[in-house]
């Protein structure tokens, strides 16, 4: 059975990597090392590169991390995303370090004025912004409105913050609607995809360690990709970053979407085995 045709989105450039608009689905991973440990972080990103990652991400929680990010950018070959969680000032400061994209969780950034300050810097340095909606950190008013994280609450959060960016004539936007509960994430992505053409970063957050995490991500991301939803992806594992990249590659390969490696087909063997 063939998969659903790709659901068209507008294209956004993350450094040299095209996301959306029919471009190949890019694979992302995130450094697990402290960003301030420049050598270890660069070494880890280089291992991602060797495995075939397209875009890397680091956390930027403080000014020391901002300064480290500038050093890291100079030593790697893939576009680097700065992940901002709570302090909008870090997004403002890191914008000029050579990064290729900002990732913010609007529910954690705070007031509209703070998001607007981030937008101004993104426009100045021509950086796309990923709005990272997470079912586990929705705005308080949305939780009061819906009672608990729902697909409707997640999509409303996304559009609320898209509106802030669009008010400033900013359209280089990528959106993710992640949750650790696969059915919730699926419903949120489907609902958003039916209402918007902004490119979608797909992922299942906190999917878990090793095999269990790989299964959770494979089920969630595989379904979305089969339905034509997804422009860039990250498999989140409590494991080595190279495993994240390889599992993502295997998901794409299994769906015959794209592959740079041969697929090995082998019988698992059982009592029916016979040798003539």
Image (cartoon, rainbow, N blue to C red):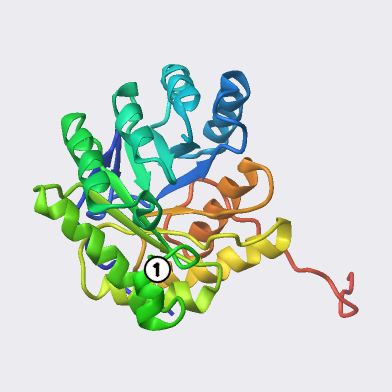
Q: Which residue is drawn at 56% across and 37% down?
A: 31
Nearest the eye: 25 or 241: 241
Q: Quadrant of the C terminus?
A: bottom right
What residue is drawn where x is 40% and y is 40%? Answer: 87
Q: Is residue 145 above or below residue 169?
A: below
Q: Position of residue 53 (x, y in %)?
A: 49, 39
Q: Nearer the viewer, residue 190 or 24?
A: 190
- The answer to whether residue 223 is seen in the rendering is yes
Task: Compare residues 112 and 247 and report the one nearer the observer.
Answer: 112
Find numbered disc 1 in the image and state the secondary structure of the residue it sits on: helix
The residue carrying mark 1 is 140
Where on the picture, by quarter, is residue 48? top right
Name the image quarter holding the N terminus.
bottom left
Q: Position of residue 168 (x, y in %)?
A: 10, 47
Residue at 72% x, 56% y is 210
Q: Nearer the viewer, residue 126 or 121?
A: 121
| Residue 3 seen in the figure | no
Q: In the rendered view, does 203 fall on the left or right side of 155?
A: right
Graded by Cα atoms within 10 Å as few (under 14), some (14 to 19) or many (20 or more), the crowding at tag 1 reads few
- 159 relative position to 268: left or right: left
The correct choice, above or below, for 14 with respect to 163 in the image is above
Count how many numbered circles sit on residues in the image: 1
Where residue 71 sits in the image (x, y, percent)?
46, 17
Tell me the residue at 16%/50% (across/down). 171
Q: In which quarter of the image is residue 257?
A: bottom left
Whole-percent x, y for residue 4 in the image: 34, 75
């Amino acid at each position: 059975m063939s998969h659903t045709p790709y659901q068209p989105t507008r294209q956004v450039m993350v450094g040299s990597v095209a996301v959306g608009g029919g471009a190949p689905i890019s694979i992302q991973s995130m450094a697990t090392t402290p960003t301030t440990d420049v050598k270890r972080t660069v070494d880890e990103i280089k291992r991602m590169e060797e495995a075939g990652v397209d875009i890397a991400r680091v956390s930027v929680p403080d000014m020391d991390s901002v300064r480290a990010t500038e050093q890291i950018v100079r030593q790697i070959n893939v576009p680097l995303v700065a992940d901002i969680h709570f302090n909008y000032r870090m997004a403002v400061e890191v914008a000029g370090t050579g990064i290729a994209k900002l990732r913010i969780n609007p529910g954690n950034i705070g007031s509209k004025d703070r998001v607007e300050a981030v937008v101004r810097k993104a426009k100045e340095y021509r950086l796309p912004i990923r709005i990272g909606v997470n079912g586990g950190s929705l705005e308080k008013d949305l939780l009061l409105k819906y009672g608990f994280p729902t697909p409707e609450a997640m999509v409303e959060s996304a559009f609320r913050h898209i509106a802030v960016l669009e008010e400033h004539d900013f359209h280089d936007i990528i959106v993710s609607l992640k949750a650790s509960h696969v059915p919730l994430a699926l419903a949120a992505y489907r609902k958003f995809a039916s209402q918007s053409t902004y490119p979608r970063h797909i992922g299942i957050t906190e999917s878990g360690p090793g095999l269990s995490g790989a299964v959770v991500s494979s089920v969630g991301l595989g379904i979305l990709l089969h339905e034509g939803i997804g422009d860039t992806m990250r498999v989140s594992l409590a494991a080595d970053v190279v495993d994240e990249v390889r599992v993502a590659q295997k998901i794409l390969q299994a769906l015959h979407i794209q592959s740079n490696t041969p697929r090995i087909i082998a019988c698992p063997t059982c009592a029916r085995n016979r040798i003539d």
